[in-house]
């Protein structure tokens, strides 16, 4: 499995290989992949919030500057098919999401270098939405003085009001 090409990156000849362990598998694969119709290609990054991708790219150290974020995101399939059509709106959203992550304590910026904080790294690793992470950091900072006496149910109740919490049902 894998990808046989990168959209808009290569115009030259490419090759894909299908490996089959039996004659039946060979015929089935040939029928599906060589003679079959192409499935639709969906821009994967368009499915989730841009802020999640921003946090993941910074937390993984794939992007260290705002310029890196612009270049990586706009060079993706989603960037080429969705975001480049309205580049101004994309750049406004990207800058707003960077500002949210900075203000929310998910990463810092010194000398133009973006660095994920421990909270930002944990949020990215656990797949927590930026809005949820920022709201949780704010909540915990507001209750810092009596953090040890916070009831776990109170914290859970707070989390139900976040974007991630709305996806969880309690019965």
Image: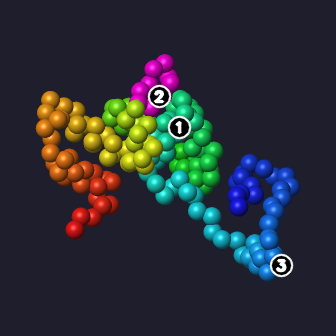
Element at label 3? helix
Q: Earlier in the sequence, mark 1 or mark 2?
A: 1
Please give left or right for residue 83 compared with residue 51 in the image: right
Name the secondary structure under disc 2.
strand
Mark 1 to mark 2 CA distance (whole Å): 10 Å
Name which residue lies at 66% across and 71% down. 39
- Label 3 crowd (10 A; few <14 / some 14-19 / many >=20): few
Question: Is the magenta region chiefly helix, strand or loop?
Answer: strand
- Above or below, 129 against 47 in this view is above
Image quadrant where one finds the C terminus: bottom left
Which residue sits at x=83%, y=78%? 23
The residue beneath circle 3 is: 23
Q: Residue at x 32, y 60 (%)?
A: 167
What residue is disc 1 on? 60
Query: How is the model colour-coded?
Result: rainbow
**Residue 107 image offset from top left, x and y in percent:** 41, 31
In the displayed structure, 153 sits above or below 135; it is below
Q: Nearer the N terminus, badge 1 or badge 3?
A: 3
Write the start and end of the magenta stretch as one range: 108-117
Q: Residue at x 33, y 42 (%)?
A: 133
**For mark 2, what is the residue?**
115
């Amino acid at each position: 499995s894998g990808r046989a090409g990168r959209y808009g990156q290569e115009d030259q000849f490419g090759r894909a290989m299908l490996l089959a362990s039996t004659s039946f598998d060979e015929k089935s694969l040939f029928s599906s992949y060589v003679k079959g119709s192409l499935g639709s290609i969906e821009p994967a990054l368009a499915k989730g919030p841009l802020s999640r991708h921003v946090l993941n790219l910074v937390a993984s150290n794939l992007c260290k500057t705002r310029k890196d974020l612009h270049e990586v995101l706009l060079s993706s399939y989603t960037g080429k098919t969705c975001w480049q059509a309205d580049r101004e709106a994309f750049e406004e959203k990207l800058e707003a999401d960077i500002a949210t992550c900075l203000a929310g304590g998910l990463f810092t910026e010194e000398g133009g270098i973006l660095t994920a904080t421990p909270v930002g790294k944990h949020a990215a690793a656990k797949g927590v939405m930026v809005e949820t992470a920022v709201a949780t950091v704010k909540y915990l900072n507001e209750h810092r003085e009596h953090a040890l006496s916070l009831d776990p149910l109170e914290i859970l109740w707070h989390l139900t009001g976040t974007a991630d919490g709305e996806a969880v049902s309690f019965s």
